[in-house]
Image: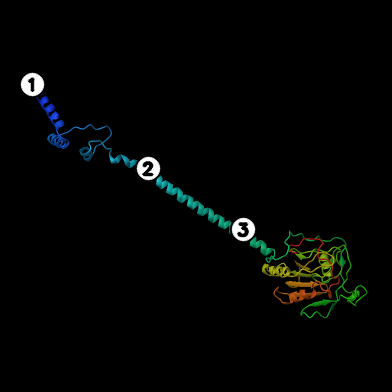
Amino acid sequence: MAAAEADTTARSEDIHAERAGSLALVPGERREAQTCQARDQPHLSVHQPAGHNLSVLDMKTTGAPVPNAKKGKPAGRRERVAAQRAQQKRAERRRNLITIGAIAAVVAVIIGGVAWYAASRGGGSGGSSSASAEVIPPGVTGATTVQAAAHQVPNTSGIPGVVEYVTSGWPEGSHNGPADQALAHDHITGPVTYSVTPPVGGQHNATWMNCGIYDQPVPSERAVHNLEHGAVWITYQSSLPQSEVNQLRAFVEKQTMVPSAEGASSRYMDLTPYPGLPSPIVISSWGFQLKLSSPADPRLRQFVSTFRASPKYTPEYGGACTGGVGTPLQR
């Protein structure tokens, strides 16, 4: 027992002596001695903090514990998932913007189509004409007057196809049919049964209608009063194709404004449908009429140029074509 203790004491003294010797060495010799001691020791126990796995390289070089690289993998996965979600949201926003843009384009096309249709219904030519909310002139009531048969005479207008009726000499008598009268100019309150369809003159209501384009039939008693003031009345069958109606409207709107001695300037043109026409299109002025099958017929322009607000053919030249009743679509 005493021998063992002596042996332990001697070994401890040797270790202390070795340490003291190493401290006395110069720095280079001290590192070499430490390296030799590390080689001579078969195993060196190093303290390892809980939760860390040390790599052999780290322990040999620095002796300090380094966290395992595997601990960073969950954080990397979370970042990738977050990046994927952000990319999906950006793609979804792009799809939404594309969808909204497509819907807006479709709505714009629909609105444009509706506007085009409305313009085509209104005549489509625009220009300086005044568009209005249409009001059909009121009809007339009271006792019915039957017009005497209008007496036809040879055409002196120089326009082929024009039918001419006696207009001169009223009211003294002009050898016009059995009534021995030209087309009458009487103002009456009630409706009139005219002998010509559409009428070319005769008795009529005391209140004329405002000249212009109407898309519904108008009272003949008011339209005839317009003829007396120099208007040209273009009538068409309700079955006339819309494209041809539009041509007629465009034609009317291109006519120049004519000054009036009794009111505002006007085109002195009426355009309306008329039931029971003998031809697709019929043009009338006071005492003259022409039947057409197409608005492209050049005689349409000839007729208007000859009889519209004409000092030669208008019974009451200078009479107003405004200040009456009704509101046309286009004046």
> In the rendered image, which residue does mark 2 sit on?
78
Do the CB atoms of the residues marked 2 and 3 lie less than 8 Å apart? Answer: no
Residue type at mark 1: give it. Ala
> In the rendered image, which residue does mark 1 sit on?
6
Give the camera-side residue of 15 and 91: 15
Residue 118 versus residue 312 in the image, above or below: above
The numbered mark, 2 or 3, whose residue comes first in the sequence reads 2
In the rendering, at what x and y percent does residue 37 appear?
A: 13, 34
Look at 14% across and 31% down and name the residue there: 24
Within 10 Å of disc 3 (Cα), the crowding (few <14, some 14-19, many 20+) is few
Do the CB atoms of the residues marked 1 and 3 lie less than 8 Å apart? Answer: no
For residue 120, which numbered disc appears in the image? none
Q: Nearer the viewer, mark 2 or mark 3?
A: 2
Give the camera-side residue of 73 and 104: 73
Residue 290 versus residue 101 in the image, above or below: below
Quarter of the picture holding the N terminus = top left
Give left or right: position of 12 versus 51. left
Give left or right: position of 79 versus 39. right
Instruction: Quote the CA–CA distance across marks 2 and 3.
Output: 50 Å
Residue 136 versus residue 293 in the image, above or below: above
Q: Nearer the viewer, mark 1 or mark 3?
A: 1
Instruction: Quote the CA–CA distance across marks 1 and 3.
Output: 114 Å
* Secondary structure type for disc 1: helix
The numbered mark, 2 or 1, whose residue comes first in the sequence reads 1
Quadrant housing residue 139 = bottom right
Residue type at mark 2: give it. Arg
In the rendering, at what x and y percent does residue 241 appear?
A: 68, 69
Within 10 Å of disc 2 (Cα), the crowding (few <14, some 14-19, many 20+) is few
Quadrant housing residue 48 = top left
For residue 111, which numbered disc appears in the image? 3
Residue type at mark 3: give it. Ile
* Secondary structure type for disc 3: helix
